[in-house]
C-alpha cells in the first residue's frame, strides 16, 4: 500500500469497517452491545474504541402558509410539516484503549450499557417521537471510522 493510499484511508475514514450489534436495549436493566471491526489496508494505532449514544425528541411543527399568491412549490411546502429535534440524552462509552490493530484482521469488543439515568423509552407518535441512536467508532489519527448511526428501539 502506497503513502497516497494511506492518506486517502485516513481522510475518508475507510481504514476499518465497523459493525454494531445490540440485540435488546432497555432503560430498566443493563444490556450488551457488540462492536466488530475489520481493519482494511494498513495497521491502525487507535487511541480508543467508543460507543456514542443519543436520545432525541422529534416533534412535528406546522409551517403556516404564506399570504398572497403562492407558486405550486410554495403551496406544496405550506402543506408540509417538518420535524424539529432536540437532544434529550447523550453518552459516550470508551470500550477499549491504546490499541494497535493489524491490517486484514477482525477484532471484537463487548460492553455493557446502563441507561438508568435516561427517562424516555422509544415512542413513535404521529406528532412526537423519541428516537435512540447508537454509533460505534475507533478514535485514531484522521477521520474516525464508524458504524454510522443506528436507530435502536429502547424499551
Image (tube, rainbow, N blue to C red):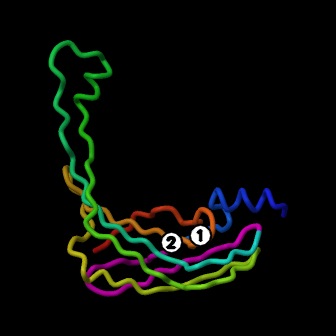
Which mark is drawn over residue 18?
1
Check disc 2 and report the residue beneath it.
136
Of residues 50 and 151, the one nearer the viewer is: 50
At 24% from the left edge and 16% from the top edge, which residue is drawn? 70
Query: Distance of mark 1 from mark 2, alpha carbons?
Result: 7 Å
At 74% from the left edge and 79% from the top edge, which residue is drawn? 102
Mark 1 neighbour class, 10 Å CA radius: few under 14, some 14 to 19, many 20 or more: many
Q: Secondary structure at mark 1?
A: strand
How far from the left and from the top, in percent, is residue 120?
A: 22, 71
Of residues 52 and 8, the one nearer the viewer is: 8
In the rendered image, the quadrant that contains the N terminus is bottom right
How far from the left and from the top, in percent, is residue 128?
A: 20, 54
In the rendered image, the quadrant that contains the C terminus is bottom left
Q: Secondary structure at mark 2?
A: strand
Mark 2 neighbour class, 10 Å CA radius: few under 14, some 14 to 19, many 20 or more: many
Q: Where is residue 25, by image quadrant?
A: bottom left
Note whether 63 is above or below 147 in the view shown: above
Segment tinted magenta in the rendering: 20-41
How far from the left and from the top, in percent, is residue 4?
A: 79, 56
Left or right: 9 in relation to 25 = right
Q: Dots 1 and 2: beta carbons under 8 Å?
A: yes
Note whether 74 is above or below 2 in the view shown: above
Mark 1 / mark 2, whichever is N-terminal: 1
Amino acid at each position: 500500500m502506497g503513502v497516497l493510499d494511506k492518506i486517502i484511508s485516513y481522510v475518508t475514514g475507510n481504514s476499518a469497517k465497523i459493525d454494531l450489534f445490540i440485540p435488546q436495549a432497555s432503560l430498566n436493566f443493563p444490556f450488551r452491545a457488540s462492536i466488530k471491526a475489520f481493519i482494511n489496508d494498513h495497521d491502525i494505532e487507535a487511541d480508543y474504541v467508543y460507543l456514542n449514544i443519543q436520545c432525541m425528541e422529534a416533534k412535528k411543527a406546522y409551517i403556516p402558509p404564506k399570504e398572497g399568491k403562492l407558486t405550486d412549490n410554495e403551496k406544496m411546502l405550506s402543506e408540509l410539516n417538518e420535524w424539529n429535534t432536540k437532544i434529550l440524552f447523550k453518552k459516550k462509552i470508551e470500550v477499549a484503549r491504546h490499541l494497535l490493530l493489524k491490517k486484514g484482521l477482525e477484532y471484537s469488543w463487548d460492553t455493557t450499557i446502563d441507561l438508568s439515568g435516561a427517562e424516555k423509552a422509544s415512542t413513535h407518535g404521529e406528532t412526537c417521537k423519541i428516537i435512540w441512536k447508537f454509533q460505534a467508532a475507533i478514535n485514531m489519527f484522521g477521520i474516525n471510522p464508524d458504524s454510522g448511526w443506528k436507530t435502536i428501539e429502547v424499551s
